[in-house]
Image (tube, grey):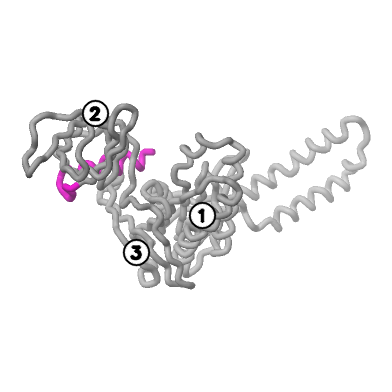
Amino acid sequence: MQHRDRDSLFAHIERVVRDLEAEGVFGATGSQQPEALRQILERRIDPLLDAFLLEGQPRVETHATVLIADLRGFTELMASQPIAVMIEVLNRWFTAMTEIILRFGGVVDKFVGDAVMALFGVPEAGDDDALRALACAAEMQQAMKALNQENQARGLPKLFAGIAVNTGAVVAGSFGAAAHSEYTVIGDVVNLVSRMESFALRGQVLISESTRAEVANAIEVGTVNEVRFKGIAQPVPLYELRAVRAPRRIVVQPVEVRRSPRIRVHLDATFRQIDRKRIRPGRIPGLINDLGYYGLRADLPLGLPQASDVVIDLTPQQGLSSLGEVYARVVRIVPWDGRFRTSLELTSVETPAHQRLKEFIDESLWRQ
């Protein structure tokens, strides 16, 4: 984030120019004049820039709200489109989001890949920083519809974003070295919101307990997902923002039909059919390639009847310990490369096996 107060820097530069004029530097002649002048200016102005970037921005502990918005599935999208198209799409995304952030009084901290991080409450704090951040997030999701309509009219692909917002104590100031530094914030608030963002579905805004508590009377929230993060003893509740009531009502419309985040996996498993509440003998080997809290997708050697029930046993692998038996129902079957791509909905939830499965998904998400 750039420092806003440049008046003192310009005053010092003006003083350097006047001193150089008095010393006759601008009147020097010879073939080396431009290079010599550049070196003189570097020696005189570099210390001023250092002071402006580092000393001019003392590090202070303060209270702020941090917003991170990230595109869903952008890596896969890049692999399917020419680089020129993706550059145009990315620039249009950043431009639209930046305009909204500034309109709600936030500051764009940085762009990281296809993500944007914004700050509310620094460098100047307000009484409604958290509420403005949530209104901004809701407006950003609403703006995606118009952005996608424009993209389609231009023959560009659609974009979908996930957004996370967290509030709390941060250290704000200039960080870096004399050669390069930037004004930003650091602290547990930033670390947590960067993890939270991985759990946001397409079109979703997730907020922390600290953010919800500050503006509870001015927002509407939906489902709560309790996530366990490494290094944090207690589960962390992530609230789905449904609407912001002030300064005007802004509704976050659902986009994703899924009820939970999902991960790409490569897990061996065995499937056993259930017939009239009895488990049939014989095990069907399968490969699970997509996994969520409430469902999965697997490739099987044979087509199971739709709406039939199965018992799934995942082999311990890839950091996944023995889960025990997980029950599911077949909802869709599609022939796929000589096998049957099968979508299943989990029917045994809130069990120890389901909890261990959820913890595996959570850890995989925030490690990405």
Q: Residues within 10 Å of mark 3 (few under 14, many from 20)?
A: some
Residue under label 3? 221
- Residue sitting at x 32%, y 62%: 222
Residue under label 2? 301
- Measure the alpha-carbon separation of dots 3 and 2: 43 Å
Name the amino acid type tagged 2.
Pro
Q: Identify the mark nearer the N-term, 1 or 2.
A: 1
Residue under label 1? 118
Residue 188 in percent (x, y) is at: 39, 50
Residue 1 in view (yes/no)? no
Viewer-nearest residue: 290 or 96? 290
Viewer-nearest residue: 314 or 135? 314
Name the amino acid type tagged 3.
Val
Query: Which stretch is magenta?
Result: 347-368
Tell me the SS state at disc 1: strand
- Measure the alpha-carbon separation of dots 1 and 2: 48 Å
